[in-house]
Amino acid sequence: MEYRTLPHGGERIGVIGLGSSALTERAEAEKTVRTALDLGVNYIDMAAAEAEAFAVCGRAIAGRRDKVYLQLHFG
C-alpha cells in the first residue's frame, strides 16, 4: 500500500480507502472491512446510506481502532 502524509496533521493515509455505503450484508461487510485492513487500507469513509454500516464497521475494526481513520459526515 502506498501512503501519503497529510500536510496539517502528519497522519499517513493510504491512497486507497474503503467506502461504506455498500456495507449492508452484515457478515460479508465485516469480512470486507477486516480484509481491507489486513491489506493496508487505513481510511474508511462512513458516508453510508444505511445506519447499520456504522455498527458493522465498529465490530470489524475492534482491536484496531487506533490504526484506522474514519471520515464522518454531519448535516
Image (spheres, rainbow, N blue to C red):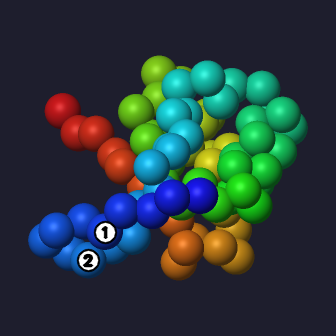
Q: Residue 67 appears at what percent x and percent y?
A: 55, 73
How crowded pointer 1 is (Cα within 10 Å; few <14, some 14-19, many 20+) is rated as few
Residue 48 visible (yes or no): yes
Element at label 1? strand
Q: Position of residue 15 (x, y in %)?
A: 45, 49
SS label for mark 2: loop
Label 1 with label 2: CB-CB less than 8 Å: yes
Q: Residue furthest left?
A: 8
As drawn, 49 above or below 63? above
Three-letter amino acid code at disc 2?
Gly
Which residue has dot 2 on it?
10
Q: Is residue 39 left or right of residue 20?
A: right
Per the rendering, the mark at residue 5 is 1
The three-letter code of the residue at mark 1 reads Thr
Q: Earlier in the sequence, mark 1 or mark 2?
A: 1
Q: Residue at the location (59% across, 58% down)?
A: 1
Q: Residues within 10 Å of mark 2 (few under 14, many from 20)?
A: few
Spatial separation of the CA atoms under disc 1 and disc 2: 5 Å
Q: How many dots with numbers? A: 2
Residue that protrudes farthest toward the front in the picture:
2
| Quarter that holds the C terminus | top left
* Residue found 36% across the figure and 49% down from its top: 71
Q: Residue at x 78, y 26 (%)?
A: 25
Q: Quadrant of residue 64?
A: bottom right
Question: Residue 57 placed where, x, y %?
Answer: 63, 49
Decide: is 69 above or below 8: above
